[in-house]
Each structure stands twice: as C-alpha cells, then as structure tokens.
Image: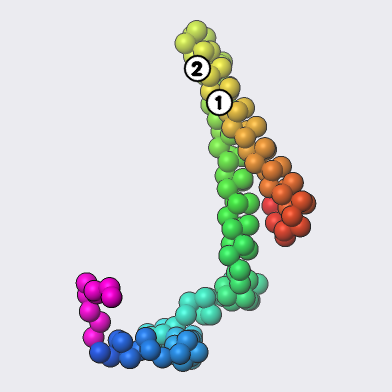
Amino acid sequence: MVKQLFPLPPQATRLYNKPVSQLLAQTTPTNCDDPGAGGVNLSDCLQLGTGKTVKEVYDKPAVLVNTIVKNVFVVAGIIIFITFLYAGFKLISDTTKGKDEAKSILTTAIKGLIIMFAAYWVVKILAVVTGAPISI
C-alpha cells in the first residue's frame, strides 16, 4: 500500500469515487457568459474567427501539432532570411575578419536551410508511406 504524502479530505475522496460521466457533467459549462460561476471549460466557450469553438477545431492533438509545425517552418525561414541578410552586410564590410565571419555565418545558414528542407521532406515522405493525414 502506498502512503499518501498529502491525505485528501473526506469530501475530495467522495468526489473521486464518482463515475467519470458524473465528473464530466459537473465540469461542462452551463453558461459561457458567466465564467465567474466556476466549472467553465474554456475550450467549449472560446470561439475562433470562424465562429467555431476551440474544442470543435482542435479536437485531436494532431491538429494542434500540425499548426505548430507549420508555424515553426515559417519562423525558421524568416530566421534564415535574416541570417542571410546579416551575412551579406558582413561580407560587404572591407575587413578580412568580416568576410571570414560572413562565410562562417553563410555556411551555418545554408546547413540550417538544408536541415529544414530535409525535415520537411522526411515528414512528407512519412505521410505518403504511412497514409497519415499530415498537412504541412
């Protein structure tokens, strides 16, 4: 038997002995207009620009992961673009040290670009091979 470090009060143990359907019925919101009433599930109440609730759009974790991955690729592309610009400014400088730094920065940026495209194509190939609905 495992000893509880923080014993629960009697009313809490009664709460946990209820069936899941009763617990879910208690936590589903009755009125999204009154969040101060307690027990409001934000995914049921918050609406996106399309008029659907968050729960309707992000019903599976895969949808959220796909959205995050798409945005990570965009941010990585912006960072690589800025890195190319920075390396270009360093290359324009007349110093030998600036040109060496620019070559190093460009090499690193190109490696990052190659890794980014490789990751994209690996995900696309896995989607085709497995038939998983991955939309990047």
In terms of depth relative to the viewer, which is nearer, 105 or 133?
Answer: 133
Task: Where is residue 25? Give x, y as percent.
Answer: 48, 90
> In the rendered picture of this protein, how many numbered marks are placed on residues?
2
Q: Is residue 45 above or below residue 64?
A: below
Residue at coordinates 63% horizontally, 51% vertically from top-left?
Answer: 70
Question: How crowded is the residue under tag 2: few (<14 C-alpha within 10 Å), some, or many (20+)?
Answer: some
Disc 1 is placed on an element classified as helix
In terms of depth relative to the viewer, which is nearer, 9 or 31?
Answer: 9
Q: Which residue is mark 2?
A: 101
What's the coloring here?
rainbow
In terms of depth relative to the viewer, which is nearer, 60 or 33?
Answer: 60
Question: How crowded is the residue under tag 1: few (<14 C-alpha within 10 Å), some, or many (20+)?
Answer: some
Q: Which residue is mark 1?
A: 108
Q: Is residue 44 above or below residue 133?
A: below
Q: On the rendered image, what quadrant is the N terminus found in? A: bottom left
Which residues lie in the magenta part?
Answer: 1-9
At label 2, the amino acid type is: Glu
Task: Where is residue 86? Give x, y as percent.
Answer: 53, 26
In three-dimensional space, the C-alpha distance between marks 2 and 1, rounded to whole angstroms, equals 11 Å
At label 1, the amino acid type is: Thr
Residue at coordinates 58% horizontally, 23% vertically from top-left?
Answer: 106
Disc 2 is placed on an element classified as helix
Mark closer to the chain start, 2 or 1: 2
**Marker disc for residue 78:** none
Residue at coordinates 53% horizontally, 13% vertically from top-left?
Answer: 99
Task: Where is residue 22? Give x, y as percent.
Answer: 46, 92
Main SS, magenta residues: loop
